[in-house]
Amino acid sequence: MAEPTGPRTGWRRLRDLPDDSPRKTVIVTLAVCLFCSALVAGSVVWLRPHQLAHREREREARLLALAAAVPGLEGMVSGLGEAEVTARVVDLDTGRAAEGIDPDTFDAQEEARDPERSRELDPEVDLARIGRRPRHATVYMVRERGDLRLIVLPVYGAGYASTLRGFLALAADTNTIRGIGIYEQGETPGIGDQVQDPAWLAHWPGKLLRDETGALRIRVAKERIDPRDPEASFAVEGISGATRTGAGVTRIVRFWTGPLGFGPFLARIREEES
Amino acid sequence: MSPGPAAPTPLRALWRPLVDENPVALQVLGVCSALAVTRSLATALLMSAAVIAVLAGSSALISALRHWIPRQVRLILEITIIASLVTVVDQVLAAFFWDLSRELSVFVGLIVTNCILLGRAESFALAQPVHLSVLDGIGNGLGYAAVLVLVGSVRELLGRGELLGHTVLATADSGGWFQPVGLMLLPPSAFFLIGTLVWALRSARPPEKGEGP
């Protein structure tokens, strides 16, 4: 056999060392560990995009299920073919996406309780009567083949006897209401609790928030609405006997689509999409 | 025949673990996971594929390194290699079989503790050349798979009247005649089935008396 030179013979020499040689133990163990870590790290890096895609799809399915479970919104989401839902946390004051906040873990209710991260509202501007407004909110954007179809905004505020919580879905023009859904309320049984009645919620789609001058006009009306009246596009007929619940819904929708709510965000969407 | 296994040939290495030396039924190894993942045929198949892949890979690597691995640290190195391969397989499953891998949950990770792997490494791969070790690994994986697929098929068929999610026996609920056996979907049924299998195989091929490991 030739004189031991080169790496191959080096390996062979290592192999021929006795098992109790510390050098052999250390070198072989280190080599195996390095090889295994490269293997594991390589596979993780290589496969990460695939796994993230699955996770993303699962989260979307959960969001769709969430939206579909809200009375009044269910038909809207299932009616879309290839819907794709993204959640983003927006800074309500600037209307920009908030950097570094994970929509999966962000809790607006918790933020509203934290004086550091919410702002106190003067009673005269606090239409929704929520007292403190969180700095951020999670909005859901539903797209179909890249086109923005729905902007789903979380809304809440005082009704007559309880806090109403729900979602307001707007079309891409940010002015046409696609639907409203209430998932939590404690209004008068049999009267005010009809805010969750699909028959009443069905009056909302197609209504407009603002007129041409940009003034917020949407309201729940106390009187009968004549569909031929030009005012009809801004008014939803109220539930009889639940005037104050209806007024609460009006205030909630106006607050959250106004300058202290999602107004800045919606303005930004109009800029981006046009 | 001399005591101990006859000299391995490629074919024997591949075929003996299927029935004659089936790791689950005769050596009663890897039973824990066999109980857990046989609720449906799909999970059983995926788990089997994972075990076969890890067994073939670990046998190949350990056999290739058999002259370098010092005896004192061999268990550590074997487990390091097996655990790395299991991690890789776990990642692959999560990337390409997301839903099924969620169902398998921790049991893919627990392949590390499956005694079949360390058993084959210790008793075969450390002493045999690479090609035989790979065949032995695949053979043992197939032996494990055979039991899983059998138990998984029986459980899914009798528990839900389906195979791989397709209706085979129309259940009474959906207007057919078959009354599903709810017990088959619960873990104890796997105990009964594997127990019956072990009994049947051992009666058919009794182990040689006084045979030492």
Image (cartoon, rainbow, N blue to C red):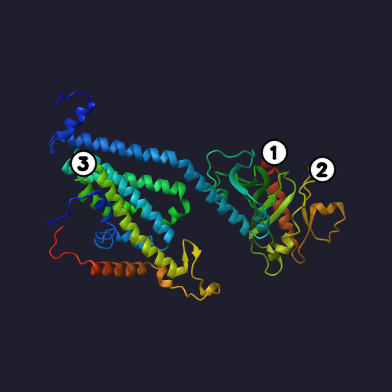
First in sequence: mark 1 or mark 2?
Answer: 2
Give the SS element for disc 3: loop
Q: Position of residue B200 (x, y in %)?
A: 28, 69
Q: Which residue does the numbered mark 1 point to in the structure image? A: A273
Q: Amino acid at mark 1?
A: Glu
Q: Residue at x 84, y 52 (%)?
A: A231
**Label 1 Cα crowd, 10 Å radius (few <14 / some 14-19 / many 20+):** few
Residue at numbered disc 3 = B66
Which mark is in front, 1 or 2?
1
Left or right position of A220 against B124:
right
> What's the CA distance linking mark 1 and mark 3?
64 Å
State whether residue A187 appears in this view.
yes
Which of these two is toward me, A137 or B186? B186
Q: Are discs 1 and 2 less than 8 Å apart at CB?
A: no
Q: Is residue B158 above or below residue A183?
A: below
The answer for how far apart the CA atoms under marks 1 and 2 are is: 19 Å
Looking at this rendering, what residue extends furthest in the right direction?
A: A228
